[in-house]
Amino acid sequence: MNKIILLGRVVKDPELRHTENGDKIYTKFTIAVQRNFRLPDGVREADFIPIKVWGKKAEVIVKYVKKGSLITLSGRLRTGSYEDKEGNRKYIAEVIAEDFKFLENKKNQDQVLEN
């Protein structure tokens, strides 16, 4: 079973993208997920998780989600590798989101973004 559930804030406004041949749409964005513990100085660190959403769901994300939005999502972890221009092997991991829920209404979100 490959299932991930995350709760976090969007780091940057998502943008709609198209595959190279233009037949599919998607969005990629990152969410900051707070860790469940604090450091000795009281600071709570966050993990920055790359997210990808495909199709109509991507359009919904781009329309309603902005930097600072609180979102919960579930999906699966996808890993892979590729060769960069210099011939080095690079490894990637991202969450392919299948379901999501917005956790703040527009008024609350605007207040968060102002602070």
Image: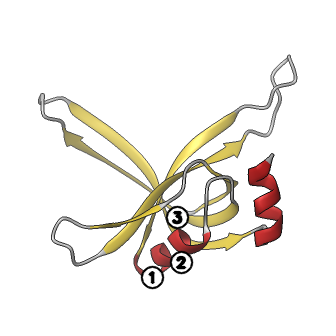
Residue assigned mark 2: 60
Vertical relation: 82 (above or below) 24: above
Q: Residue 108: give x, y in percent of width and height.
A: 83, 64
Q: How is the image coloured?
A: secondary structure
Task: Determine the image quadrant of residue 36.
Answer: top right
* Quadrant for the C terminus in the image: top right
Q: Which residue is depicted at the point 81% across and 22% down? A: 39
The residue carrying mark 1 is 56
Residue 59 located left or right of residue 86: right
As rendered, which of 70 and 91 lies closer to the eye? 70
Residue 35 is tagged as none
Assign a secondary structure to mark 3: loop
Alpha carbon separation for disc pair 1 and 2? 6 Å
The residue sitting at the bottom extreme is: 56
Q: Mark 1 packing: few (<14 Cα in 10 Å), some, or many (20+)?
A: few
Q: Residue furthest top?
A: 41
Residue at 82%, 69% (x, y): give it. Answer: 107
Residue occupying image coordinates x 27% and y 35%: 90
Q: Do the residues bearing badges 1 and 2 touch, measured as CB atoms within 8 Å?
A: yes
Q: Which amino acid does the dot numbered 2 rest on?
A: Val
Q: CA distance from mark 3 to mark 2?
A: 27 Å
At 47% from the left edge and 77% from the top edge, which residue is drawn? 59
Residue 1: mark in rendering: 3
Image quarter of residue 5: bottom right
State left or right for residue 45 relative to residue 82. Answer: right
